[in-house]
Image: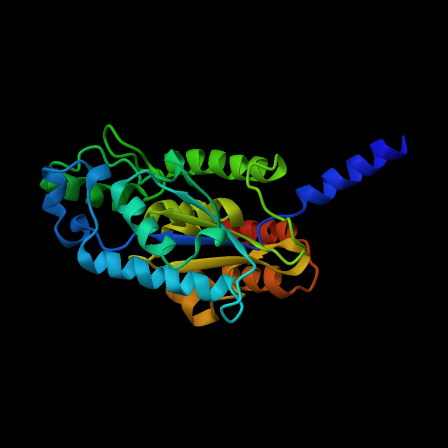
Amino acid sequence: MGNATNSATTKREKQRQLPKRIILVRHGESEGNLDKNVYAITPDHRVQLTEKGKEQGKKAGEIIRGVVCDKGNCTSKVYFYVSPFLRTRETLKEIGAAFCSSEIIGVREECRLREMDYAKFRNTEKMEEFKKEREKYGKFFYRFPGGESAADVYDRVSGFIDSLWRDIDMDMIPYGANDNEDLNVVLISHGLTIRVLLMRIFRWTPEQVDNLISPKNAEVRIMELGHEGEYSLALHHDDQTLEKWGLSAEMIVDQKLRAYGPVVDLDKCFFTRYFDRLADK
């Protein structure tokens, strides 16, 4: 009985060992970022990085290593999930070069981190019409003909987040041999997908996400465990940066509560503000 109790306690403690940081990175500058006509002759998943994009990836790797390593003495471990698109895999290659092999404990391609499917991107003129139509209809729920909406991306991203927690709970990400090791999960993905990932983790509304700005090429957004084990962007990014990304004043307050406390019921605060907004409409 005693062994069973100890085993159950150990399991619960293991499940609480969440990654210290979840780091989101958009791919570097691609050929499609320079010229939308590229999509007329090249499938989206085969669009490559430019030379500038590769340099941006290298810089992102330096930034990430500077965050996870203490003055060059790195005891932290890094696990990469990457979209299967060529430009994200090329970005991973440049980022990974900043780390030595002993610091990287795994790399996995994850299809659910792929770009939103625009379907008709080969017809660039028609795509511009669809994008104007999306502005009128609503960015989050508008589905491109034959493609996806941001709401569709939310569904697959939600499945990925659930899988990530299971991977950790089931020891699919091996780390923790030493007490001073921190796990850092790096997700290399695409602009809209990253915005929706943040929405899923922080329980933002479609209205809030519509106002967010996509990360720039190879931009790094860092979530770290703060007060009471809540992930927050506020530990690495100041108010001005969060505001520039499109976070409202109340969203920034939530990030600070997650980072520093005081202990509050964030869900209760969220719902109170939600119904206040409905009353104003």
Q: Judge from the rendering whether residue 275 lies leftward or rightward of residue 262; answer left or right.
A: left
- The quadrant holding residue 212 is bottom left
The residue sitting at 35% across, 38% down in the picture is 141
**Direction from residue 110 to residue 272 in the image, left or right:** right
Q: Is residue 27 above or below residue 242?
A: above
Q: Picture coordinates of residue 224 (x, y %)? A: 55, 58
**Residue at x 47%, y 70% (from the top left corner):** 239
Q: Is residue 96 visible?
A: yes
| Residue 205 visible in this rendered orientation of the protein | no
Question: Looking at the image, what colour scheme do you see?
Answer: rainbow
Q: State which quarter of the image contains the N terminus.
A: top right
User: x, y (%) of residue 106?
Assistant: 47, 43
Residue at image position (37%, 66%) is 244
Q: Is residue 32 above or below residue 9?
A: below
For the point 20% across and 60% down, which residue is it? 52
Residue 180 as seen in the image, left or right of residue 279: right
Q: How many marks?
A: 0
> Which residue lies most toward the top here?
146
Residue 205: x %, y % from top left: 47, 47
Q: Position of residue 98 (x, y in %)?
A: 38, 59
Residue 126, compared with residue 64, is above or below; it is: above
